[in-house]
């Protein structure tokens, strides 16, 4: 049996503690350096544009990216959740941005309900009715959900050039939409508002109605 000097035995716990502390510090540094690199590589186009700040998302096609922008007049789909606006003397919902969950069939209707989750809380957001076929509501409002694609990699500076207008859901059909919209994709919805009052329009079951549905991609897709 080898007997260590008393002083060396006394310093063994301190030595082990310092070794473990160094290992922990290294792991923490490594973790943050890796995550910083990943976040830096999420979307190079957004990094080049100082108007954007990526909140979350790392898909190759950019379909799950949530961002914030101080220039909301140009980047209308900034942020997440359900948002309100003050108009004509009232405050009501006007925009919704969330993770796509599903399309719910509405009995005896060609429409669908859009089911989404709040990216911040994980909770379901209010249902939104997507209108497939053009019609006039009982209040005299023109109803049909327009369809568009937000292009994050666009180098344009004005909002209208950041989105590709695709037409309407009626033009493309549910099958085409479902092929291009997967669970976890970010969708933005501009809600239909009553012309006379500015109040958000709701259907007979008190669900919000969509004026425009916008998908999100880094580059313009070829098959849509």
Image (cartoon, helix red, strand yellow):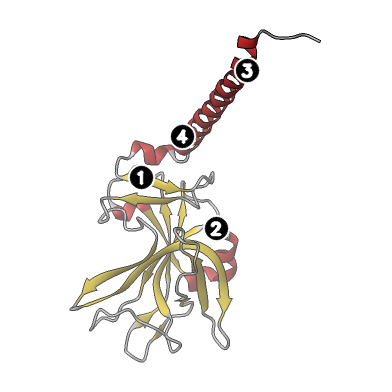
Q: CA distance from mark 4 to mark 1?
A: 14 Å
State if disc 4 and disc 2 touch (CB < 8 Å).
Answer: no
Label 1 vs 2, first from the N-terminus: 1
Give how far across and how far down residue 144 sits, in percent: 41, 77
Q: Residue furthest left?
A: 89
Helix or strand or loop: what does disc 3 sit on? helix
| In this picture, residue 78 sits left or right of residue 99 | left
The 10 Å Cα crowd at callout 4, few under 14, some 14 to 19, many 20 or more, is few
Instruction: Please give the name of the residue rendered at 41% of the width and 78% of the height, measured from the top-left corner.
Output: 208
Which of the labelled discs sits on residue 12, or is there none?
A: 3
State if disc 3 and disc 4 touch (CB < 8 Å).
Answer: no
Q: CA distance from mark 1 to mark 2?
A: 20 Å
Instruction: Please give the name of the residue rendered at 55% of the width and 55% of the height, measured from the top-left corner.
Output: 223
User: Which is closer to the viewer, label 2 or label 3?
Assistant: 3
Label 4 vs 3, first from the N-terminus: 3
Provide the residue designation for mark 2.
Answer: 184
Helix or strand or loop: what does disc 1 sit on? strand
Quadrant assignment, res 3: top right
User: Which is closer to the viewer, label 4 or label 1?
Assistant: 4
Label 1 vs 3, first from the N-terminus: 3
User: Which is closer to the viewer, label 4 or label 3?
Assistant: 3
Q: Residue furthest right?
A: 1
State if disc 3 and disc 1 touch (CB < 8 Å).
Answer: no
Q: CA distance from mark 4 to mark 3?
A: 36 Å
Provide the residue designation for mark 1.
Answer: 53
Provide the residue designation for mark 4.
Answer: 36
| In this picture, residue 56 sits left or right of residue 160 | right
Q: CA distance from mark 2 to mark 3?
A: 52 Å
């Amino acid at each position: 049996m080898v007997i260590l000097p008393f002083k060396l035995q006394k310093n063994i716990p301190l030595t082990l503690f310092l070794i473990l502390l160094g290992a922990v510090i290294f792991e923490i540094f490594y973790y943050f350096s890796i995550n910083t690199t990943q976040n830096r590589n999420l979307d190079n186009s957004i990094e080049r544009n100082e108007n954007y700040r990526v909140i979350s998302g790392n898909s190759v096609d950019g379909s799950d990216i949530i961002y914030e922008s101080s220039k909301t007049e140009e980047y209308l789909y900034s942020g997440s959740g359900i948002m309100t606006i003050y108009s004509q003397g009232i405050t009501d919902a006007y925009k919704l941005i969330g993770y796509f969950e599903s399309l719910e069939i509405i009995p005896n209707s060609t429409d669908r309900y859009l089911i989404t989750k709040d990216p911040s809380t994980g909770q379901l957001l209010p249902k939104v009715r997507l209108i497939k076929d053009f019609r006039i509501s009982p209040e005299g409002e023109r109803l049909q959900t327009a369809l568009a694609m937000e292009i994050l990699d666009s180098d344009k500076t004005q909002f209208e050039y950041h989105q590709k207008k695709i037409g309407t859901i009626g033009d493309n059909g549910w099958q085409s939409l479902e092929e291009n919209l997967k669970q976890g994709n970010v969708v933005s919805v501009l809600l239909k508002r009553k012309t006379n009052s500015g109040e958000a329009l709701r259907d007979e079951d008190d669900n919000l109605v969509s004026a425009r549905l916008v998908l999100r991609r880094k580059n313009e897709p070829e098959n849509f």
